[in-house]
Image: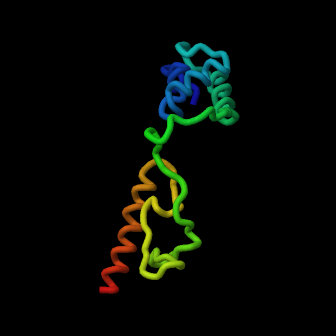
């Protein structure tokens, strides 16, 4: 709605949508002034920029800054019902030892908790 743009600066259009530094880069790319009041033209330019923005990954900050590890025991070698190894009976896997990784946001922690519970319940059943 146009009337709501009366109080918004261009630099605020992407707040909460993308990282602030990335948002300022996008604003520079479309050649609009970050401090000017937003209008329909700047909104459309930024919308197009967000939809078509591309980055070339140059590297990482290394393992110490990683949020998830990838690799581990292949899931096809594990029974999906109790997480027991299909190769070695009575060997169970849970958490990041399995080749399972999710998006950031707690999914990997949830997988660790859930898979640990599955294994624990199976071991309790066995006595």
Residue 24 versus residue 69: which sits nearer the camera?
69
Q: Is residue 40 visible?
A: yes
Q: Is residue 86 above or below residue 43?
A: below
Report which quarter residue 65 is drawn in: top left
Q: Give left or right: position of 122 versus 9.
A: left
Residue 13 x %, y %: 54, 27
Name the outermost residue toward the front.
Answer: 88
Residue at the bottom extreme? 126
Q: Is residue 88 above or below residue 60?
A: below
Residue at horizontal 59%, vertical 22%? Answer: 25
Q: Which residue is pictured at 43% across the width and 74% down the height?
A: 92
Q: Nearer the viewer, residue 78 or 5?
A: 78
Q: Decide which of 86, 51 is in the foreground and name it.
A: 86
The residue sitting at 56% across, 22% down in the picture is 24
Image-quadrant location for residue 110: bottom left
Q: Which quadrant is home to the N terminus? A: top right
Residue 77: % across, % down: 56, 73
Residue 42 x/y as whole percent: 63, 22
Residue 3 visible (yes or no): no
- In this rendering, the answer to whether 127 lies above or below 104 is below
- Relative to 96, say whether 80 is above or below: below
120 horizontally vs 36: left or right: left
* Quadrant position of residue 26: top right
Residue 76 place in picture, x, y as percent: 59, 72
Q: Quadrant of the C terminus?
A: bottom left
């Amino acid at each position: 709605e146009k009337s709501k743009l009366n109080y918004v600066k261009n630099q605020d259009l992407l707040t909460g949508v993308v990282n602030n530094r990335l948002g300022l880069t996008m604003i520079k790319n479309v050649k609009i002034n970050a401090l000017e009041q937003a209008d329909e033209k700047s909104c459309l330019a930024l919308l197009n920029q967000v939809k078509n923005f591309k980055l070339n990954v140059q590297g990482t900050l290394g393992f110490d800054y990683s949020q998830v590890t990838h690799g581990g025991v292949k899931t096809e070698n594990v029974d999906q019902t109790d997480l027991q190894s299909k190769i070695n009976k009575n060997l169970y896997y849970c958490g990041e030892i399995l080749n399972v990784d999710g998006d950031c946001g707690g999914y990997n922690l949830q997988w660790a908790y859930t898979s640990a519970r599955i294994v624990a319940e199976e071991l309790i059943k066995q006595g």
